[in-house]
Structures are given as C-alpha cells and as structure tokens.
Image (tube, rainbow, N blue to C red):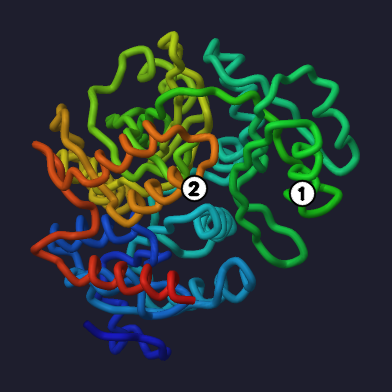
C-alpha cells in the first residue's frame, strides 16, 4: 500500500492509475465500498483527514491520501479535490457523508472535472431537506409524522402545535454550513416542553437555521435502498433493523435482508421518480404497531450497513462505478433473503446504552444481554471482521479501546 501527498505530473502520479477514490475512509460504508470495488479488480485510493483510516487498512486499498477537514475547511477540501482531479481526471469519486457529498455535488455542478454517480444540486437539496421530504410525501399520499419548523424567531411555535410528548427534534438538514464551517447534528428526543425549548435552542446554529419538531413514531426501522439513472429505477434492496444505536432509533447494529415490500417500493418510486433522481438513495421508514409505514427521511448517500446488501449480491458501489463510467449496469433481478449483518462494536454500545437507561426494565436488560451474547445464527456475518481482510477489524477495535481509555 502506498501513501500519496505530493503533486506530480499525471504520468508519474500514482493516483492517475487508480480507478476509484473513496472519501471518508473512517466510515463503515467506505470500507464496504473499498472491499467491493477492490474485489472487482479496481485499484482504489482511500482518503480522509488522516492517511490512516479504517478503510485504508484494508488489503484492497492501493493508495492512502489525506485532505483538509471538509467540516472546518470546506474551501481547502474543494481546492484539494479540484487539484487532484486536474492531475488525475479518470478516477470515479465516492463521497460517503452528509458533509462531503454536497461538496462534491456542488463541485460537479460548477464544472469541476469529476466523475461520480451523484444527483444534481437541486435534486440533492430537495432530498436532504427533511421538511421538503415530508411535504412531498404528503403530496404523494405517503404517511409522514406531523412536523413543525422552528427557528430562533419562533421558538414558541413548537408549544403551540398540539404535539403530544415525547417528540423528536432533528435538524432540517443533517449537515449545515455556518460561518465558513459545516456542522453535523444528530436527532434528539424530548419528553416535555421545557426540554424541547432547551434542545431546539441549542441545536440551532444561527438566526437563519431551522430545526424540525416531529411526533415520535415508535416501531421497527425499515430501509429501502435504490439506484436510479436520471429518473429511471435500476433496482431496489431492503433490510429491517433488528437492533440500533441508540436503542430508541439510530444506526443499525444488527440488520436482516428482506424482500422489498411492494407498497414501499411504489412509495419510493413516486418520491424518487418525481425528483428525477440519479445515483443511490436510502429511504427510511418506520412500521408502527398497526403495521402502517411512516416515511422518516431520505439519505442521498451510501449507508452504514451497506455491507449487508453486498453480502446478499447487490453491489451498489460497483453499479455506481458502472453508471459513472457509462457501462451497462448489471443490477441483479433478485438477492438473498434472510441474511444478517452485525456490527459488533455498535452492538456493544447498544447493550451499554440499554443498561444505562433508567426506564428500561430488568427483563429488557437481561433480554438484551442474552441476545448480545448469542455469537452466531444461520446467515449471520460480522461487518468488519472478514477472514479475507482482517486488518480493518483490528484497526476498529484499537480505535474503540483508545476512545474508552481517554
């Protein structure tokens, strides 16, 4: 594995020999992408704010790069990527997060010579605007939670809407620019009006920022994952979340592949087809106790549990590469059902948070412990630990232990 930092002519530039550049190398989705593309015989460069990252430790990584932090120095990141593209114009770029995806989308929209399977700027902004998504869903006859927009100017609006507690406070956009930086914010849960006011105020970045206050939907998370070619659906995949971090709802730590429910597929087609979508999208739903599906949000990027789709025969990064270079996309007609993916370190956090929850019963805590201690079931694979590529699991375990000891 080589590490690259300097500028050289294209003929001498090792990145010019790479087929793909995977950004955000510390992300699990980046590791799944590197393994997928490398397994297809492509030469893959991995980049992050440091050259050493989870994905760079994979045997499928050819070159390691570092770039300016896109959150604190977005202009520096754009200059770095533009310079790289000018000197090595043939690679396909794969951004992984809500910070880097819009930066790459903007660069392509402004004419920078980059190859990627990403939507246009207008499409992207509509998809990641959670309020716009909720309104579009209601217009298409798709259920979505009751939602209020709150800013510094109308903080009391959330008290006047008649929402019953608990409620969810979420940023209108997961990543928001303010003061020359990009901030990523997470979802919060509020049990009363006082907590709601405090949380909303602390989440807002400035006078122009907005957050959403939304009724809480209790149920099982279900994701529908789609690939589109300028409004044409190329294929779908679905999984259900069996355990999440935090337990109240968040990223999947144990998931299972399921058939795409026909009613969800039709809803996703109405949403994304109406946007003339291009590239991948993760459309999140929750199924409540009555069996009704509620739209949560659209993620316009590859997702954390991507490895499950790949294990089931749906290689989204490879299809994105084919789309970006103009090859026919080989999306499969079917995939394996009932396969499981476990992110063990995330599952450990799920266990810890359950035991910390003062409202969780002893029975719930013991049940969670018993399920955690079950190391294997038919069709289960561990996300990071692969015998054919063991270094990323060791890298992640070392980082986890370092974080505990700080």
Q: Mark 2 sits on what residue?
A: 356
Number of residues whose C-alpha sits closer than 10 Å to that of mark 2, classed few (under 14), some (14–19) or many (20 or more): few
Number of residues whose C-alpha sits closer than 10 Å to that of mark 1, classed few (under 14), some (14–19) or many (20 or more): some
Residue 276 picture location, percent across and down: 48, 30
The numbered mark at residue 204 is 1
Q: Is residue 27 left or right of residue 388?
A: right
Label 1 secondary element: loop
Above or below for 172 versus 383: above
Near-viewer residue (234 or 193): 193
Q: Is residue 74 left or right of residue 360?
A: right
- The residue at the point 42 percent across, 65 percent down is 24
Residue 134 picture location, percent across and down: 61, 25
Q: Are marks 1 and 2 in contact (CB under 8 Å)?
A: no
Q: Is residue 23 left or right of residue 11?
A: right
Near-viewer residue (359 or 310): 359
- Which residue of the protein is positioned furthest toward the right in this rendering? 153
Q: Is residue 383 visible?
A: yes
Residue 368 picture location, percent across and down: 33, 39
> How many labels sit on residues?
2
Above or below for 245 versus 335: below
- The residue at the point 25 percent across, 40 percent down is 370
Q: Residue 183: which quarter of the image?
A: bottom right
- The residue at the point 58 percent across, 46 percent down is 121
On the rendered image, what quadrant is the N terminus found in?
bottom left
Mark 1 vs mark 2: in front: 2
- Which residue of the protein is positioned furthest toward the front in this rendering? 362
Residue 287 picture location, percent across and down: 43, 19
* CA gap, disc 1 and disc 2: 28 Å
């Amino acid at each position: 594995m080589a590490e690259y930092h300097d500028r050289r002519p294209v003929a001498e530039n090792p990145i010019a020999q790479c087929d793909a550049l995977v950004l955000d190398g510390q992300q699990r989705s980046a590791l799944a992408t590197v393994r997928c593309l490398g397994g297809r015989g492509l030469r893959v460069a991995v980049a992050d704010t440091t050259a050493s990252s989870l994905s760079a430790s994979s045997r499928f990584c050819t070159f390691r790069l570092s770039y300016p932090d896109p959150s604190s120095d977005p202009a520096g990141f754009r200059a770095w990527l533009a310079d790289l593209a000018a000197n090595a114009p043939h690679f396909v770029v794969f951004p992984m997060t809500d910070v880097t995806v819009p930066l790459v989308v903007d660069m392509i929209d402004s004419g920078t010579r980059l190859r990627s399977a990403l939507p246009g700027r207008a499409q992207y902004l509509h998809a990641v605007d959670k309020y716009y998504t909720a309104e579009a869903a209601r217009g298409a006859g798709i259920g979505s939670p009751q939602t209020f927009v709150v800013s510094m100017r109308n903080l009391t609006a959330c008290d006047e809407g008649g929402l019953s507690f608990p409620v969810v406070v979420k940023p209108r956009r997961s990543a928001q620019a303010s003061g020359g930086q990009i901030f990523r914010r997470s979802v919060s849960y509020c049990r009363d009006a006082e907590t709601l006011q405090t949380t909303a105020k602390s989440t807002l970045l400035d006078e122009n920022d907005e957050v959403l206050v939304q009724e809480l939907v209790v149920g099982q998370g279900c994701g529908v994952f789609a690939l589109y070619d300028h409004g044409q659906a190329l294929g779908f995949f679905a999984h259900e979340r069996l355990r999440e971090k935090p337990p109240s709802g968040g990223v999947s730590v144990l998931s299972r592949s399921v058939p795409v429910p026909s009613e969800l597929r039709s809803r996703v087609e109405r949403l994304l087809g109406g946007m003339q979508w291009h590239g991948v999208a993760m459309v999140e739903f929750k199924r409540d106790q009555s069996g009704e599906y509620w739209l949560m949000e659209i993620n316009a990027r590859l997702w954390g549990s991507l490895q499950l789709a790949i294990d089931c025969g749906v290689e989204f990064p490879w299809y994105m590469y084919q789309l970006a270079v103009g090859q026919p996309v080989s999306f499969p007609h079917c995939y394996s059902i009932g396969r499981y993916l476990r992110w063990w370190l995330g599952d450990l956090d799920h266990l810890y948070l359950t035991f910390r929850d003062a409202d969780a019963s002893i029975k719930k805590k013991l049940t969670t412990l018993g399920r955690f201690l079950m190391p294997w079931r038919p069709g289960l694979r561990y996300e990071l630990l692969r015998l054919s590529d063991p270094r990323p699991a060791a890298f992640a375990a070392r980082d986890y232990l370092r974080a505990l000891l700080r």
